[in-house]
Image: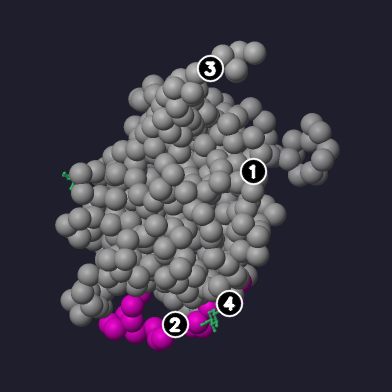
Amino acid sequence: MIRAALSPLLLLLLVSWASRGEAAPDQDEIDCLPGLEKQPDFQQYSGYLRASDNKHFHYWFVQSQKDPKNSPVVLWLNGGPGCSSLDGFLTEHGPFLIQPDGITLKYNPYSWNLIANMLYIESPAGVGFSYSDDKTYVTNDTEVAQNNYEALKDFFRLFPEYKDNKLFLTGESYAGIYIPTLAVLVMQDPSMNLQGLAVGNGLSSYEQNDNSLVYFAYYHGLLGNRLWTLLQTHCCSQNKCNFYDNRDPGCVNNLQEVSRIVSNSGLNIYNLYAPCAGGVPGTDRYEDTLVIHDFGNIFTRLPLKRTFHKALLLRSGDKVRMDPPCTNTTAPSTYLNNPYVRKALHIPEKLPRWDMCNLLVNLQYRRLYQSMNSQYLKLLSSQKYQILLYNGDVDMACNFMGDEWFVDSLNQKVRSCWAVGAGVPGVALSCRGHTWRRLQS
Ligand SMILES: *[C@@H]1O[C@H](CO)[C@@H](O)[C@H](O)[C@H]1NC(C)=O
Ligand SMILES: *[C@@H]1O[C@H](CO)[C@@H](O)[C@H](O)[C@H]1NC(C)=O
């Protein structure tokens, strides 16, 4: 009865009002994504968010497969700096994973969008399909946090129907810096319903990351006793070792050897027990080998020749491809550079090819924080957020022990200890030696 009473004019008004303020942007909706046998039941969007006056961040948003209206919004960022969050999408926890042929997508039974509205943003400008009008890709931690915050605001402007949903900020590796610095901005914005953050194998403190890595390497059998004894002699005194910013020339020499073993000897720095795609890198010669230590995240204080980087930069114009060490990016690159895929994702034709990581962004990136200590303490002190730091135990780029030491250094009250004996309630054998811990304020 009531419906019958609505005049056609009122209906028309309702419809036009809805499409202006309350609905997702039609032009960004992905109608048909190449590579899938069957298009998904959930909606997905790809387009651009305004990160500043001249920076445009590419986003890919996939609705939750379960009750999107009441599911949280979860932002995901990969690290580098300089690497694309579509790595997370296509090879980790997106709804479909790229297959080795670079053409086919397969549904992922462990996709995070089973229960969350997932927002993947390529950040900063210069990464993946994100760009800046002036093509300047020099940036720093403060600017990136601000840009990510602006992009997130723009997302909620485009998708106002999600602005009251719970919001979680997540990422891995160098996003160990991006996520807490962004969270500190978001927590001050009452228009966003921030509930928590999660960081996987994140860079939390360079000092703790380097110091723990040497122990990780020794106790995983990567360093011989001769090298270990030399490290003890030159880097340690009074039972305290400094593998981070030690100036002792003997220590520096031996740390360079550790660095070579960990990141340039054919071991996969992201998974000690996985093969290294592409095999053992060239040679050990420091002079002309491109020594990338996980994008410069480990042993940052160690003097290393960077001349090769500069020469490479000078030779190769404005887009320099860099693959993460031991990682084969052929399949995702093939897929994302397919013109039909780019069209489906609404990528402007003028943009250059998609690469997993952009070396120029990485090399020109200015790191401003040595530790995320004050950011986490600020977030914890509000007593409002759930914070999860989780680690896989065989990653050496940001190893579990460094993050564990970092969490310990925050001096929070321990609510419940790590337990061996899964499924046995109440078993709490130890608070030490675990690979992840949940922080709760
Ligand atoms: C990388 O993966 C592609 C398939 O996606 C394969 O054809 C190629 O041989 C691989 N390259 C290396 C170096 O493993
Ligand atoms: C970070 O980048 C912004 C924007 O370019 C700049 O204004 C700021 O001075 C930079 N901060 C530092 C400490 O370099």
Q: Which residue is mark 4?
A: 101
Residue 354 lies, in percent from the top left, at: 38, 67
Q: Give the residue drawn at x 36%, y 25%.
A: 189
Q: Which residue is mark 1?
A: 65
Identity of the amino acid at label 3? Leu
Q: Which residue is mark 2?
A: 281
In magenta, the rendered stretch is 274-296
Q: Which quarter of the figure is the C terminus placed in?
A: top right
Viewed as shown, does residue 281 lie left or right of 395?
left
Discs 1/3, front:
3
Q: Considering the whole magenta stretch, tell me its main secondary structure.
A: loop
Above or below, 64 against 97 in this view is: above
Residue 66 lies, in percent from the top left, at: 66, 39
Camera-side residue: 394 or 385? 385
Above or below, 219 against 407 in this view is: below
Residue 14 lies, in percent from the top left, at: 46, 24
Q: Give the residue drawn at x 49%, y 23%.
A: 8
Camera-side residue: 38 or 303? 38
Q: Which quarter of the figure is the N terminus placed in?
A: top right
The 10 Å Cα crowd at callout 1, few under 14, some 14 to 19, many 20 or more, is some
Element marked by disc 3: loop
Badges 4 and 3: C-beta atoms under 8 Å apart?
no
Discs 2/4, front:
4
Among the two numbered marks 2 and 4 on one chain, the one whose residue lies closer to the N terminus = 4
Q: Which residue is mark 3?
A: 6
Identity of the amino acid at label 2? Pro
The CB of the residue at mark 3 lies under 8 Å from ligand 2: no
Element marked by disc 2: loop
Viewed as shown, does residue 29 lie left or right of 55?
right
How many numbered discs sit on the rendered protein? 4
